Image: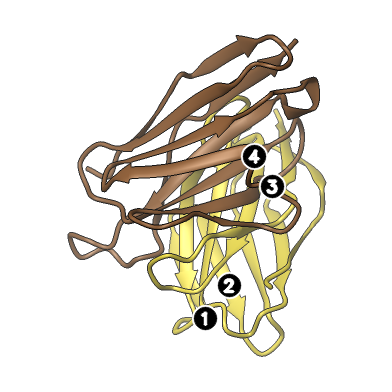
Amino acid sequence: GAVVSQHPSWVICKSGTSVKIECRSLDFQATTMFWYRQFPKQSLMLMATSNEGSKATYEQGVEKDKFLINHASLTLSTLTVTSAHPEDSSFYICSAPSGTSGRTYNEQFFGPGTRLTVL
Amino acid sequence: GENVEQHPSTLSVQEGDSAVIKCTYSDSASNYFPWYKQELGKRPQLIIDIRSNVGEKKDQRIAVTLNKTAKHFSLHITETQPEDSAVYFCAASYNQAGTALIFGKGTTLSVSS
C-alpha cells in the first residue's frame, strides 16, 4: 500500500509553454501533498504544500503565479509550470504523508518524479 | 523555519568498512528524522527513520542515532557493499499531518570493492 504516482515521468517542452504534472495517491487519501524540486546533484527543495480544498502554501522565493497548484480531490494534486523557461528544467517530485493504517503522519511517500526539460 | 546541515558531502570507503553521515537541525520542535537513499533519476527511498522518543534505532546493517540536546543525528552503515553506493539524504520535520520534510544537502557515498 501507500503508492504515489506521477505523470508524466518526463516531458520536453518549448520555452514559453505551460506544463502540467499530476501527482496521485493510489491507495490512500491525502488531504496534503508536497511538491519538491531537485536540480542536478542537489537536494530536494520544498516548493509548496498542496492542500485539498484550499489554496496552496508556497515557500519563500517560489512564484505562486508561475507554479500553479491545484488539489482537486483527496487523491490528486497538479502542478502547472506556466510560461516555462530553461531555468525551470528540473526534477519535480511530489510526496504525500499517510496518516492511516496505523502509520504515523509523517511517513512520506514519494512519487517517482517528473523530469522537465525546457528548450 | 527548520534548517538541516549534512556532512560530509562526499564519502568514499572500501567494501566492508563502515560509513557515518552526520546531520544537525535547527528547530528544537522537530521530532521526526528519516534517512533516504536516492539513486540517479529515481525517487528517494526511506531506509530508516527515528522519532524523538528514542535515541537509537537499528535495522540490520543500518543504524541511526539521535541526540536531541545537541540537535544532531547520524546514519551508520556497517559492512558496506558496492550496492550501498548512492546519494543519502537526511531530513527533519514535525511528526504531524501537513508538515513537510526539510532535507539536508545530501552525501554521495561511494563504496569500492
Residue topped by disc 2: B65
Q: Secondary structure at mark 2?
A: strand
Structural distance between the alpha carbons of marks 1 and 4: 31 Å
Q: Residue at x 82, y 54 (%)?
A: B8
The image position of residue A44, as x and y in percent, is: 65, 45
Residue topped by disc 4: A37
Chain whose colour in the figure is brown: A
Neighbor class of circle 4 (other Cα within 10 Å; few <14, some 14-19, many 20+) is many
Total numbered circles: 4
The image position of residue A1, as x and y in percent, is: 22, 42
Quarter occupied by residue B6 = bottom right
Q: Nearer the viewer, residue B8 or B63?
A: B8
Tag shown at residue B55: 1
The chain holding disc 4 is A
Structural distance between the alpha carbons of marks 4 and 2: 28 Å
Tag shown at residue A99: none
Structural distance between the alpha carbons of marks 3 and 4: 33 Å
Structural distance between the alpha carbons of marks 1 and 3: 24 Å
First in sequence, mark 1 or 2: give its number: 1
Quarter occupied by residue B13 = top right
Q: Nearer the viewer, residue A48 or B62?
A: A48
Amino acid carrying mark 3 in the image? Asp
Q: Same chain for labels 1 and 2? Say yes or no.
A: yes
Give the number of the mark in front: 1 or 3.
1
Q: Residue at x 72, y 48 (%)?
A: B106
The chain holding disc 2 is B
State the hue of chain B: yellow
